[in-house]
Amino acid sequence: MGAAPSTVGTSGTASQGGTVHSLQELRRSASLATKVFVQRDYSDGTTCQFQTKFPPELESRIERQLFEETVKTLNGFYAEAEKIGGSSYLEGCLACATAYFIFLCMETHYEKVLKKISKYIQDQNEKIYAPRGLLLTDPLERGMRVVSSGQQDAGG
Amino acid sequence: MTPGGSSGPMKDCEYSQISTHSSSSPMESPHKKKKSVPKRKWEVFPGRNKFFCNGRIMMARQTGVFYLTLVLILVTSGLFFAFDCPYLSEKITPAIPAIGGILFFFVMGTLLRTSFSDPGVLPRATPDEAADLERQIDIANGSSSGGYRPPPRTKEVIINGQTVKLKYCFTCKIFRPPRASHCSLCDNCVERFDHHCPWVGNCVGKRNYRFFYMFILSLSFLTVFIFAFVITHVILRSQQTGFLNALKDSPARYPFTVVCFFSVWSIVGLSGFHTYLISSNQTTNEDIKGSWSNKRGKENYNPYSYGNIFTNCCAALCGPLSPSLIDRRGFIQPDTPQLAGPSNGITMYGATQSQSNMCDQDQCIQSTKFVLQAAATPLLQSEPSITSEELPLPGKTSISGPCATLTLGQPTPPSSMPNLTSDTGLTDMIPLKEEHEGHQFLTPEEAPSPPGMLPSGSPIAHSHTMHVLSLASQDSLHEDSVRGLVKLSSV
C-alpha cells in the first residue's frame, strides 16, 4: 500500500469539516493541485516505512510537528501490520493447515490494520489537513510507495 | 419522452424535445453507455497478464505449460487412485488412499493459489508521481539529461549496514524497492521477485512465494508417495502372480510412472533448493546473481536475513500476507481528474497513451500530425474550410477505436515521447475516457485556446455523426496543439 498522494481539495467545503462527501469533492478537485510526495524509507529493509523528513513544500502549509507525527503514526501502523510474532505465526500455520482456504472467509491481520490506517488517515484529513487546505492520500492507492499531500494553489 | 398521442402542438413540442434529445444523443449516449458500464481496473491493467473471473484470477500470458502441469498431476494421481489404491487399501491399509487424497488436495490447492494470485505486482507510477521523481532526479543529477534515455538511475540505500542499490524502472517509472525486480515476461515490477515459473503460469514473488513453496514441497511428497506405492503394488502382485504378470496388469500407466520417477528428482531437488533459499532468506534472483555471496567480498552479507534459520523460515512461510496493491476488481473512478488545465505543468503529464498495439502506429502518425497542426495553427485562423479537412483526421482515428480517440488527447510527456509504450497513464487515461462528457465542455473554457485554432462552433455545423467525436477530438486537438508547441519549443 503506497500512500496515495494526498490531494488537497480546494473547494470551500474544506471549512465545513470532514464529511465523506466533502472529502470526495476535495479529491476530485485535488487532481488540479500540486502534489507533494513523501517517499518510502528503506533503511530498515523491505518493511513499509515512510520518510519522516519534512518536505520543504509544506513549510508554509502545516506545522512540521503535526505532519511528522502523522507519518510516524502511519509507520507505527505498518510496523504493526508486518510484525512477525506469535499471532502472525498462528495465522500462518492455520492458513497453511487449511490449504489457505481460510482466507476466503477470514480477513488477515494485515487487512485489519489497513482498515485502521485508512480510518486514521480520514480522521487526520478531517481534523488537521482539510482545514489547512491539504489532503493526505492513502498509500495503498499508490502502491505503498508514497504518501502524497496535495495542495491546491488557487483558493476555492 | 412519452410515446402515444397528444395534441398536435404538444406533439410538436414532444417531437422537438425528442429531436433535441436525439441530436444530443450521439454525444450523450456513448458517454452514458460508458458511464453505465464502469470499467474495472484489471481491464486496463498495463502489464502482460491474463485475468479471469472478472479480475479475481490473475496469470501470466503464457499458460500452456501450466495446463501441462495440471494434466500431469491430475492424470498421474488419477491413475494411482484408480489402479493402485483399491488393491493397496485392501492389502495394506485404507489410510493410503486417504493420505494420498489429502496430499492431492493440498497440492492442487497450493498450485491454484500460486497460479491465480497476485505475486506482488507493483502498480505503475501515476503521472504526478513519475513527474515528481523525474524532477528529483534532475535536481540530483544537476544537468539536463542528454539523449532520449539518460544513464540508468540508481539510488543507494543502507539497509542493516549493507549498501543496496535501488534501480529505476523505466517501464513502471518507479524506483524499485529492494528485492523487487521487473519481470520481462509479465512486464511488471514484482516485489521480492523470486522467478517467473512457467509451470505455474505466473511470477513467484512476495505474495505467493509461500504457496509456491508449499506446492513444490507437497508435490514432492505426493510424487514420492505415488511412486513408492506403485512400486509396492508391483512387488506385492509379483509375489502373487509373478513379475511379468504384475506388469501386464495395466500397462498404460507405466509411462506416467516413468514421468513420476523423473519428476521426483527434479521436484525434490527444487524443494531442497528453495528450502535452502528460505532458510537463508534469499530469492532465486539474488542467489543466481550472487548478490549476497561471500565471494563478492568479506563484507558482503545478506541484510534481510534474521540471523537464524528458524526465524527466516517462519518469516517466509508464516509471516503476514500483504494485500494486493493493484486492486484488480476496483472500479476506475470516473471523477478522478487526470487531465488538469494545461497551465499546471505537472498534470500536463497526466495524459499518457494507452498501450494498445493497434494504436502505436496511429499514435506516431497522430503525434506528428498534431505537431504539424500546432505549428500551422496561426495560419488556419480564418479558414473554416481547412478546419473541415482537419476534422476528418481526428474522426478517422477515432473510428479506429476508442484508444485512438484518447491518443488524440493524450500526448506523451516529452521525457517518454519516443517511447510509445509508456503505459503509466493507462489507469489514469480511462477516467478521461469516461469524463469526456465533462471534459469536452470544460476544456474549451479552461484551455488557453491557441490563436483561433478551431472555432468550437464549427464541428456542430458538420455531420451529426461526427459531432461527438469531433468535439472530443477538437478539445484534444486544442490541447495537443498547445503541447505540440511546448514540445517543439522544448526540442
Image (tube, coloured by chain):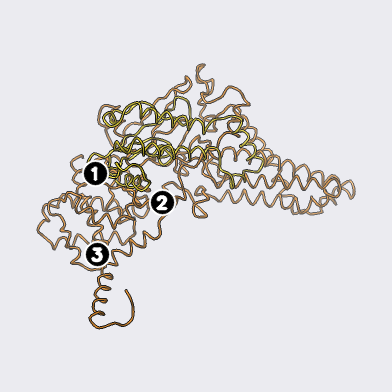
Residue pictured at 23% horizontal, 50% vertical = B368
Q: Is residue B449 left or right of residue B360?
A: left
Give the SS element for disc 2.
helix
* Residue B417 visible in the snapshot: no
Q: Nearer the viewer, residue A118 or B439?
A: A118
Which label number is shown at residue A46? none
Which label number is shown at residue B467? 3
- What color is chain A drawn in? yellow
Q: Are marks 2 and 1 in contact (CB under 8 Å)?
A: no
Q: Amino acid at mark 2?
A: Val
Instruction: Provide the residue designation for mark 2.
Output: B44
Instruction: Provide the residue designation for mark 1.
Output: A156
Nearest to N terminus: mark 2 or mark 3: 2
State the CA–CA distance, disc 2 to disc 1: 33 Å
Q: Is residue B315 left or right of residue B255?
A: left
Parent chain of label 1: A
Q: Going by the picture, which residue comes out furthest to the top?
A: B298
Residue pictured at 57% horizontal, 48% vertical = B65
Callouts 2 and 3 in the same chain: yes
